[in-house]
Amino acid sequence: MPVSQLPQAPYRQDRAVFPTPLTTDVLFSEVRDCTRASFPAYGTPHPNAAKWPNHKLIFIKTVDIERDGIFEFYYAADRDTQDLYNFASGYRNVIGNVGGREFRVVLREYVTPRADFDPLFPEFGAAMPNVPEGTFDNIEYVFFDKQQKKMDQAELDSLYVAEVRTYIERAFLDEKLSFSAERPTLTPERFRATLPTVVTEEIVEGKASLPVPTGDQISISEDQINPDIKRVRTVSRSTSDDDVTLVGTRAYVEQTVASTTETYSQSELTAEEGLLVVQSQVTPLGDGSFIRETVTVNEWPELVGSDWDNNVKAQVRKIQQFVDPPTEADLYAQDTSFTPVTKDRFLRVTETVPYEVVAGYFVTYSSTVDINLPNVLRSVEVVWSADNAIGTYESNWNGNAAGDNISLSGSERGEANGSASQEPEVLLDIEYPWGQDCPINIHIFYVKPTENAYVDGQYTAGSFVSSDLVISRLIEKAPYWSSASGIKRWPAFKPESHRIITTGKRVNVSAQCNGSFSFARSDEQEHQDSTSGSGFSVAIDTTINVTNVPPTLHPLIDLSYVEDRPVVASASCSVQLPFGGNASSSASSPSNISASVNPKSLSATYPQDIPRSGYYLLRYQSEPYKWGWHRVTASVIDASLFAR
């Protein structure tokens, strides 16, 4: 408190004030006349150092009396031993808001000369002075923070700073102050309105530790309030024994309205099934609860559309609808397909067949083709090579004798050769038709043979696309032939090969004869002697030739007119001797030697020739299309191209 301001005689001491329990910390003032003296600086020691060795000037103010020059001088001593009395102990919430953690603390208030004030002193964790000694022996306190404040006495404020230092017990700093544990809220937010959270708090004895959420608890925390008690806070999600269901609607295909149902349950759920169930799924949340989301429609609409069919150049109308699984009979429904979507729902697609378009479709264009044409055997001719030679030989003896004694002798020899031959040769007349780059017309159209059927549980297979069906369609539609001339199927050629064997004969014959005669007359005696002889030989040669006729078409070829031809050869010779003697010989070939040709006929092939006139279905290809129809590509050729 301030000292009295009553007028005093110069250097007269006013009454003193004792702001602390220590008398040495007395605060006093003196009134002085300073009309003839200057003012000393603040902090100047008291002039009476013997009496006031620790006091110094801290404040000067005027005294409101009847004359000027009178001032009051205030003196105070530094509080060097203030730790003896400047403390207060208790509990304090040093962190957080009200209701937070409280520490056991000691508060010490210091008055420090401004010149000695250090805002960074003491450091955090520095030990608190153990003054008064023995007061705080059981607990170790350390510096936590400090707070500066204004002095209560204006006289002290010029040279001193007041601050409050907080010391907390060290052991408490080493402990954890707060623990919390939580698990994620698995319940979807849209269900939380019906399942609110519940928060509870309680104060219990003991030390805070890490808690474990149990049951419906979402989070739990423990906060140490002070060394002896803690606050336990729990947040739980309320539960319901009944399922919680949220119902809504949403737009679906073709403006169909679908119903949405979301169910939250503490029990296991199963996905819903059925024709009208668009989708249904069950999701376990991981905490023993389940969410089922189901979308259903009241009915499935028929969706009408069309697809462009580039083959027939027309739009094909389609009707699509989800239906129950098809029956066995449904699976054979005409122009209808069933595609499984789920076990309870199939997509049925029914096409409206553009019958008039398909039945009337007929496209023609020109092209060329290489045709493998068979060779044609026009005729078979047999020519003969014949040779015939006849040999003869005759001789007469001519001789003379002179004198009485006559001697005559001589010999005669004759030989004759004959030959004959027959050699047949086969000449073939074969045509080699040319079938490259033959012009044709190609027609594309659709035909519908008898369809497969499923009636009364019985399956009946339909007919196939035959050449007769294709030809009848061509006669109906193609413009360049009449039904009178018609069109025929291009034949399947079956050329045949043959082997003709010719047997030729050659005969050589030879005839030989010889004779000798001798005559002698002497003394009217005669001696006559003669001899004769004959012989022949026959040589027969056979030649066989084979003529291979390549695979060809041909009509009946008759070679019966080609008769076997005999081969006959002969030779004869004779020699005459005197007195009517002679020798002769003759030779001829056997009568059964003949040349031949086999076989005598070639059976006609089928066909006997390639077509030479008229229109023919050269080839066609049939591919299954849709709706029981087949797409046919037919090639037609004018056979007059091959006319000779």
Image: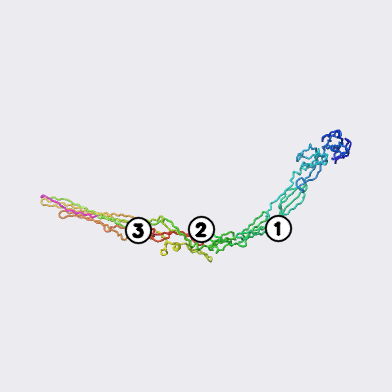
Q: Which mark sits nearer the N-terminus, 2 or 3?
A: 2
**Could you tell me the amino acid type at mark 1?**
Ser
- 420 above or below 117? below
Which element is circle 2 on? Answer: loop
Which element is circle 3 on? Answer: strand
Q: Distance between the residues labelled 2 and 3?
A: 51 Å
Give the number of the mark in front: 1 or 2: 2
Question: Residue 4's x, y, as percent?
Answer: 87, 40
Q: In which quarter of the image is residue 506?
A: bottom left
Give the number of the mark in front: 2 or 3: 2
Query: What mark, if any, has residue 310 been given in the picture?
Result: 2
Question: Residue 582's x, y, as percent?
Answer: 18, 55
Contact between marks 1 and 3 (CB within 8 A): the answer is: no
Mark 3 nearby-residue class (10 Å; few <14, some 14–19, many ≥20): some
Q: In which quarter of the image is residue 129?
A: top right
Query: What mark, if any, has residue 378 been given in the picture?
Result: 3
Q: In which quarter of the image is residue 440?
A: bottom left
The residue tagged 1 is 240
* Most foreground residue, 187 or 307: 307
Q: Which residue is drawn at 31% across and 60% down?
A: 561
Q: Give the range drawn in magenta.
A: 389-404
Q: Distance between the residues labelled 1 and 3?
A: 106 Å
Query: What mark, if any, has residue 330 been given in the picture?
Result: none
Mark 1 nearby-residue class (10 Å; few <14, some 14–19, many ≥20): few
- The secondary structure that dominates the magenta segment is loop
**Could you tell me the amino acid type at mark 3?**
Arg
